[in-house]
Image (cartoon, rainbow, N blue to C red):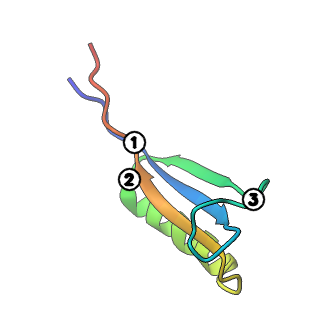
Amino acid sequence: MTSGSNFWVIGGEFGSMNFHKLVEGSAQVKGPFKTRKEAEDCWREVSEESRHKAGVRFSIVEEPARVVA
C-alpha cells in the first residue's frame, strides 16, 4: 500500500541569474499540499508577490510516495 504524495513550493532569492545558490536567509518552503492544484495556487501567489525581483524563483516539488507496511 502506498500513501499519497505531498507537494511543496520551495524557493527564494538567488545571488545570481544562474539560480544555483540562494541568498542566505531567503529560503522559503510552503506546504505540504495534498494536491498539485493547491501547490500551483500557492506558487502563483508567491510568484506574483515577488515578480518585481528578477532573482527570485519558486518551484513545485513532489515528495516521493512512500510504501506503508
Q: Nearer the viewer, residue 22 or 64?
A: 22
Residue of label 2: 35
Of helix, strand and loop, which one carries label 1?
loop
- The amino acid type found where label 2 is placed reads Thr
Going from N to C along the chain, the mark reached first, 2 or 3, is 3
- Nearer the camera: disc 1 or disc 2: 1
In the displayed structure, does residue 43 sit left or right of residue 65? right
Q: Would you say the residues marked 1 and 2 are in contact, meaning their CB atoms lie under 8 Å apart?
A: no
Q: Position of residue 7 (x, y in %)?
A: 43, 50
Neighbour tally class for label 1: few under 14, some 14-19, many 20 plus, Cα within 10 Å: few
- The amino acid type found where label 3 is placed reads Ser
Q: Would you say the residues marked 2 and 3 are in contact, meaning their CB atoms lie under 8 Å apart?
A: no
Q: Residue at x 66, y 63 (%)?
A: 12
Quarter containing the C terminus: top left
Q: Nearer the viewer, residue 60 or 21?
A: 21
Residue of label 1: 63
Residue of label 3: 26
Neighbour tally class for label 2: few under 14, some 14-19, many 20 plus, Cα within 10 Å: some
In the displayed structure, 67 sits above or below 20; it is above
Going from N to C along the chain, the mark reached first, 1 or 2, is 2
Q: Residue at x 66, y 76 (%)?
A: 55
In the displayed structure, does residue 9 sit left or right of residue 64? right
- Nearer the camera: disc 1 or disc 3: 3
Q: Please identify the residue farthest to the top as the structure is shown.
A: 69
Marks 2/3: CA distance?
25 Å
- The amino acid type found where label 1 is placed reads Glu
- Nearer the camera: disc 2 or disc 3: 3
